[in-house]
Amino acid sequence: MTDESSSSQHFEAHITIAYADITALDHLASNTSLSRQKLKKAMSNGAVWLESSIGTQRLRRAKKILAVNDLLHLYYDEVIQNTEPEDALLIADEGEYSIWNKPYGMYSQGTKWGDQCTLHRYAEKHLQPQRPAFPVHRLDRAASGLMILAHSKTMAATFSTLFKDRRIQKQYRAVVEGKLDNISLPYVISSDIDDKPAVSSIISLEKHGDNTIVTIEIKTGRKHQIRKHLSELGYPIVGDRLYGSGKSEENLQLQSNYLKFNCPLTDETQEHSLD
């Protein structure tokens, strides 16, 4: 049984498996109007999900044989499927985890419509030797800079604990509109975001023409925290489409530029920075 909706360029298909012994690709081809080539690409790009007795997860194997009463979900968007990710830069490969410079426009996490434009999927395709990759923190799509990926669920849990316990020092660099020179450093911004406490601290200032480069640390990790706090201060980040003045056509000038932590493998200090 199939439930398919919307247009051929953007639609969902939900297929209940009524009989076994044929592949996932065969089921999709029999129940949608897409070509097998497009379906294979959609599977590779993370737009197909399998709901079975063991849970729900992305299905990339076109030749997988499904069981009766399994549910196959396809979330197809032509624009998303044809979007190619920018190249990310590998900073350090420590085997069980790696450090990357994520470019502007690349996602930290995927959606049900696909994950080919995410950093972790890029890493899975480009790291040698190949291995799974798990995001352990987030960075806005419009921001760039340093990110950590774990290469096992155990290491992902370890880094989640390090972030939760605030044992990873992070700094961000932003170019803000206007000359910000009337504050004493460090300058703490502590206004709630979405009714939750949020604390940011400006630790350095540098003139940048008519604008200012600020270095900022955050004590909490609320969504768009730095962008909201700087905008509330009256100095929005250059290129901020959501919280800015609309004066600039540049990309968001926000970068995660510094990470420092003790390596969970060796306990040696890891320190990474971007110029």
Image (cartoon, rainbow, N blue to C red):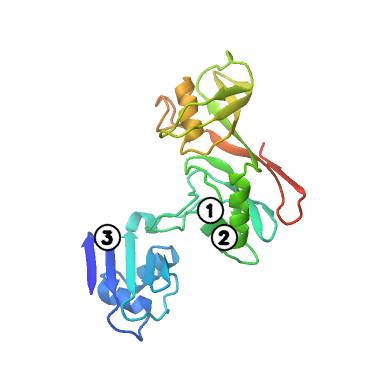
Q: Residue furthest top?
A: 182
Q: Give the residue type at disc 2.
A: Ala
Image quadrant where residue 265 sits: bottom right
Residue carrying label 2:
133
Q: Residue at x 38, y 55 (%)?
A: 80
Q: Residue at x 23, y 71 (%)?
A: 2
Q: Position of residue 236 (x, y in %)?
A: 47, 25
Q: Position of residue 1 (x, y in %)?
A: 23, 75
Q: Nearer the viewer, residue 71 or 117?
A: 71
Quadrant of the image containing the C terminus: top right
Note whether residue 89 is visible: no
Taking 131 as reference, is 122 above or below it? above
Label 2, residues with CA under 10 Å away: few <14, some 14-19, many ≥20? many
Label 1, residues with CA under 10 Å away: few <14, some 14-19, many ≥20? many
Please report contact status of discs 1 and 3: CB closer than 8 Å, yes or no: no
Please report contact status of discs 3 and 2: CB closer than 8 Å, yes or no: no
Q: Dot 2 lies on which element?
A: loop
Q: Nearer the viewer, residue 248 or 233?
A: 233
Alpha-carbon span between mark 3 and mark 2:
28 Å
Q: Dot 1 lies on which element?
A: helix
Residue 11: mark in rendering: 3
Q: Position of residue 249 (x, y in %)?
A: 43, 31
Residue carrying label 1:
119
Q: Give the residue type at disc 3.
A: Phe
Task: Please report whichever mark, 2 or 1, sits nearer to the chain's N-terminal start.
Answer: 1
Alpha-carbon span between mark 1 and mark 3:
25 Å
Label 3, residues with CA under 10 Å away: few <14, some 14-19, many ≥20? some
Task: Please report whichever mark, 3 or 2, sits nearer to the chain's N-terminal start.
Answer: 3
Q: Residue at x 33, y 71 (%)?
A: 72
Please report contact status of discs 2 and 1: CB closer than 8 Å, yes or no: yes
